[in-house]
Structure formats: structure tokens, C-alpha cells
Image: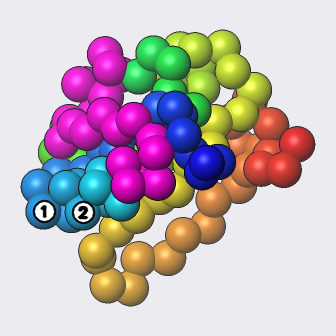
Amino acid sequence: MSGLTGRLILVVEDEPLVALDIAQNFERAGARVITTRARSDAIAKSEGVSAAILDFGVGDGDGESLYAELIARHSVRYLQWLFATARAGRSVHYEADRHEGAAPGD
């Protein structure tokens, strides 16, 4: 039994083939996956997610502000997350305590 069995993963990715690839890999590991291309749709479908794979640049927003809204909306201290981007040279300097959620590992 995988550690992902039964977990609900939210994938927010505006490239359909990338989203499909990510979703299939998590599903093979036993997770349930919700995919969406839009920030607004992600918020509507996010109830009960235990982790999120967020594209930095989705059509109607960005992954970082989406993460902050998911934390606030669901009153959780921490949501496992992974930011992804295809933009070459994109530097990620994410401060774990920038949002009210706990730092990874807490």
C-alpha cells in the first residue's frame, strides 16, 4: 500500500499534457487527483485536498497567491505543496513563514 493511497491531490497546471502526466503518476501511486487549469476553479475544487502541485503561472493568477488562499480558506496550518514552472531561469525564493501556515516539517 502506498503512502498516497486515498489522498486527494490538487494539480493546477495550464498545460494539459503536463497536468495529465502529473495526475497519472499520482493516480498510479494510489492518490485521487483533481486537475484544473485555472486558479478560480482550483479554489472551488480544493475542499479536502492533502497536497497541491501548483504551476507558478496559471492563466488567471499565480501559484504562490493560490497557495496562500488555500491555506486561509481551509483554515489549515500547513498544506503540502510543490511549485512547478517551465520558465527557464525562474528563481524561487519562497519564505515558508510568509504566510500564516506552518513551515514545512512542522
Residue 105 seen in the figure: yes
The residue that label 1 is drawn on is 17
Residue underneath mark 2: 21
Check residue 28 for magenta coloring.
yes
In the rendered image, the residue lying farthest to the left is 16
Where residue 20 appears, as percent x and y from the top left, is 19, 55
Q: Quick one: 76 or 87, which is closer to the camera?
A: 76
**Residue range highlighted in magenta:** 26-45
Up-down relation of residue 62 to residue 78 (above or below): below
Q: Determine crowd level at label 1: few under 14, some 14-19, many 20+ residues with C-alpha closer than 10 A.
A: few
Residue 62: where, in percent of width, then height? Answer: 34, 46
| Residue situated in front as seen by the camera: 45 or 27 | 27
Pick out the residue farthest to the right.
106
23 or 99, which is in the foreground? 23
Residue, far bottom: 89
Q: What element carries label 2?
A: helix
Circle number at residue 77: none
Tell me, yes or no, whether the highlighted magenta stretch contains residue 30.
Answer: yes
Above-or-below relation of 99 to 58: above
Mark 2 touches mark 1? (CB < 8 Å): yes
